[in-house]
Amino acid sequence: MAAALGGLGLLHGRFRLAAAAAATSSALSPRAPVRGGAAALPSAGRSYGSEAKEEEELRVRYLDEEHKGADLKERAKMHSSEVGSFVSKARATINEMANLPVPTIAAIDGTALGGGLELALACDIRVAASSAKMGLVETKLAIIPGAGGTQRLPRTIGVSLAKELIFSARIVDGEEAKSIGLISHVVEQNEAGDAAYRRALALAREFLPQGPVAMRVAKLAINQGMEVDLVTGLAIEEACYAQTIPTKDRLEGLLAFKEKRSPRYKGE
């Protein structure tokens, strides 16, 4: 939800994904689609800046009910030979979302079931309204989560609990999702029905002032480090840290600290 990116919701509407970008050159262009899936909405904002004060400067994009992707009625009409390709495309799209070099926040104000939750799991942070509904319900349809759910859910909430939710096809609300660690923040829904979205915007504003290169390599270090042992992870951190040393932004951060002012980062 800041600076140039897009998202998509799968299965059900009222699921919003906003991407919080702390970089420009590595982000998607203002009108670029997310490959393999739905196209991103045109941005309403301006270019990246470290001192954004108005909401339109955060450049949020999301796809909601009108762009909800997987439709079970359409799936029912598919020949069995088409299903594998369909799921592969969904998996590829969600993997691209997971690998975006910027922070991403999923704001769940309504329902995120099946592919919708798999997309949310590919985001760095999830925020939901207390009334929101979430679940990987595929076993109820005699299939399994096929766009990363069997891998990302255990990594998020633990193996045993992930198995329980997938085996039972249970749907949880925002409060329970918070208690099991599926989401980071839960908020009471408002009259406009966008409480989670507003909370996600507030989080994005906390990210926006930070150095773009630092944000990119911090995400890389965390993501790659979580897949390896500690010694290897520390080596990854060292390599990522080294990428920040020659940047102009690092020098700007030091100068701004010395001059007691806000830094003006350019992602260089």
Image (tube, rainbow, N blue to C red):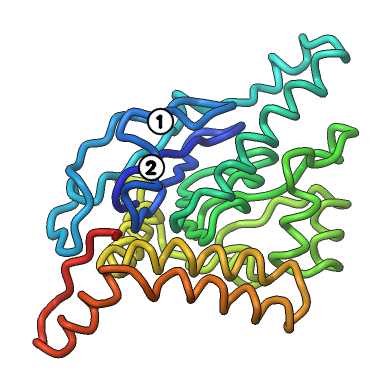
Residue 263: image quadrant is bottom left
Name the residue nearer the viewer: 191 or 105: 105
- Left or right, 229 with reference to 116: right
Q: Check residue 66 in the rendering and tell me which mark sits there, or answer none.
A: none
Whether residues under marks 1 and 2 lie with C-beta atoms below 8 angstroms apart, the answer is yes
Q: Position of residue 63 (x, y in %)?
A: 43, 33
The image's mark for residue 40 is 1
Q: Residue 124 placed where, x, y %?
A: 53, 60
245 in relation to 142, above or below: below
User: Disc 1 marks which amino acid?
Assistant: Ala
Instruction: Pinpoint residue 255: horizontal percent, then vertical percent.
Output: 16, 82
Does 3 sit above or below residue 221?
A: above
Residue drawn at 62 percent across, 53 percent down: 121
Position of 111 compared to 235: left or right? left
Q: Is residue 9 above or below residue 241?
A: above
Q: Residues within 10 Å of mark 2 (few under 14, many from 20)?
A: many
Instruction: Please give the name of the residue rendered at 29% of the width and 60% of the height, measured from the top-left corner.
Output: 268
Amino acid on which disc 2 is placed? Leu
Circle 2 sits on which residue?
A: 5
Q: Secondary structure at mark 1?
A: loop
Q: Earlier in the sequence, mark 1 or mark 2?
A: 2
Does 248 sit left or right of 231 as displayed? left
Residue located 38% across and 42% down the image: 5
